[in-house]
Image: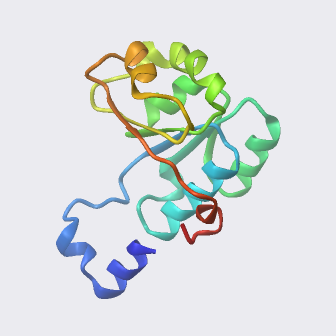
Amino acid sequence: YMGIVLQSLRLDELIFPIKMSNLKIGFIGGGQMASALSAGFLNANICTKENIILSDPMEIAAQKAKEKGFNFTFDNKEVVKFADVVIMAVKPYVVPKVLEGIKDVWGPNKLMVSICAGVTLSTFESVLGSSARISRVMPNTPALVGTG
């Protein structure tokens, strides 16, 4: 919503001199919240479809991502390699296993954003390192319909 307001006022060019449309965003987990957030990023012109990638072990997630024109992979490492910002959107109990699987491709210029309830920053730091850039956020139910 804020992106739409900024664009209508043309303030986005004054506030964000760097084109956000070049930002590459990856989702590890392709469920409802990832779908809602990716749609919101597109609506707010934060990035383009070509600059979004999702990974998920389920074939149905692959089908949905491809229908929307997003990049898709079954390999979480490919998401990390592709994206500037990686959004961890998996069930909390899966996070440690996912982190172990991506730690060797994680880099200092990446930002991890976790939407996994109850998973602490120390869980991420214990695998990615204490200098890793990590943020926890909690989108709410209205985010699913673009009003959160």
Which quadrant of the figure has residue 67? bottom right
Left or right: where does residue 15 sit relative to residue 4?
left
The relative height of residue 27 versus residue 74 in the rendered view (above or below) is below
Q: Residue 122: where, in percent of width, then height?
A: 40, 21
Task: List the single residue furthest toward the front.
Answer: 118
Q: Residue 57: where, in percent of width, then height?
A: 74, 29
Q: Nearer the viewer, residue 34 or 54?
A: 34
Q: State how many labels appear.
A: 0
Task: List the single residue furthest toward the bottom.
Answer: 9
Residue sitting at x 49%, y 61%: 41
Q: Residue 53: where, in percent of width, then height?
A: 56, 43
Residue sitting at x 45%, y 35%: 82
The relative height of residue 141 versus residue 44 in the rendered view (above or below) is above
Residue sitting at x 70%, y 45%: 31
The relative height of residue 98 versus residue 83 in the rendered view (above or below) is above
Left or right: where does residue 33 sit relative to residue 51?
right
Residue sitting at x 54%, y 66%: 148
How is the protein colored in the picture? rainbow
